[in-house]
Amino acid sequence: MKAIFLCWGVALLQAQSTELDRFLTQNGYHLTPAGTPIDEGYISPKQRYIFVEELRKLPGIQKIAEVGFNAGHTSEIFLEFVQNSQVVSFDINLHYYTNAGVEFMEGKYKERFLFVEGDSSQSIDKYSKDNPNERFDLIYIDGCHLFAACLDDIVNFRKLAKENTVLWIDDTNFPDVQQAVALAERLHIIQVVKSFSVEDAIGMRAWVEARYVLNRAQYTANR
C-alpha cells in the first residue's frame, strides 16, 4: 500500500508540474518524493489548490513578502495567480537548488521579483530599516520551523505590515511553529482568523491565516 501511495503522489505532481518544475528538472534538480529522501522543496497539490483559491478571494493583494523561498514554488504561485504582484522573498539559501529557482524567477518575472539572501532574523529587520515606508498586502512565513526563529519572523515582519495585511503562517502542524503562533497571539502581536489542514499523497499540511494587531483598538474590534 505504501508504494502505491507514493507512486500516486509522484504521478499527481507530474500531472501538475509547472514551468518552474520543468526548469528545475532541465537543470538536474528533481524535487519529487521519488528523487529526494523527503518532499523538501515542494508545496503539496492540495495546498497549492487552496492557496490559489484563497488568493482569488483577496483582490486587494499586490505586494507580497515571504520567508522561505526554498525552490520557489510559492513565489511562482504568488507571481502567476496575483495579477501585477510584486514578491520579495527572504531565504538563507542553503538548499542546492535554490539558486536555480531564483534564476528562473528573475528571468521570467524580472523586476516583479526580489530575492533577499541571509538569515531572516537579521535580513527582515534590515530590509524594514532600509525601506521604512514599505508595507505588504500579504506576508507568508515558511522559514525555519524552530520556535525562536519562527517567532522572530512573525515579530520582524510586523514592521512591514499595515492594518489589513494578510498573514499566512505555514506548517502549524510542527509543534514549535504552533507554539510560536500561540505565543504571538497571546501577546497580541497577531490574531488568527482561520486555520487550514489538508492531506494528500505528499502528506499533511496545516497553516493559519492571521492579521497583525497594530493597536489595541484593532484587537478589541476583531474579537
Image (cartoon, rainbow, N blue to C red):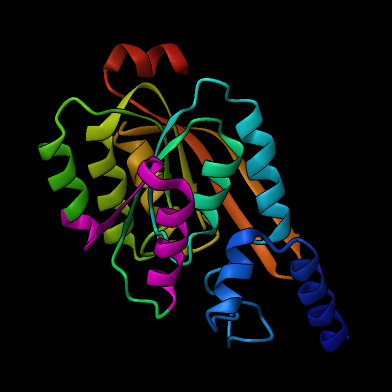
Residue 152 rendering spot, x and y as whole percentages: 25, 52
Query: Does 4 sit left or right of 167 as displayed?
Result: right
Considering only vertical position in the picture, is 218 above or below 130? above
Range of residues picked out in magenta = 97-122
Secondary structure mainly formed by the magenta segment:
helix
Residue 186 picture quarter: top left
Considering only vertical position in the picture, is 63 above or below 102? above
136 or 62: which is nearer to us? 62
Q: Residue at x 53, y 43 (%)?
A: 78
The N terminus appears in which quarter of the rendering?
Answer: bottom right
Considering only vertical position in the picture, is 189 above or below 99? above
Residue 220 rendering spot, x and y as whole percentages: 38, 14
Asked if residue 116 lies in the magenta stretch, the reply is yes
Q: Residue at x 16, y 34 (%)?
A: 131
46 or 35: which is nearer to us? 35
Decide if residue 69 is in sight here. yes
Residue 52 rendering spot, x and y as whole percentages: 66, 41
Considering only vertical position in the picture, is 185 above or below 3? above
Residue 17 picture quarter: bottom right
Asked if residue 136 lies in the magenta stretch, the reply is no
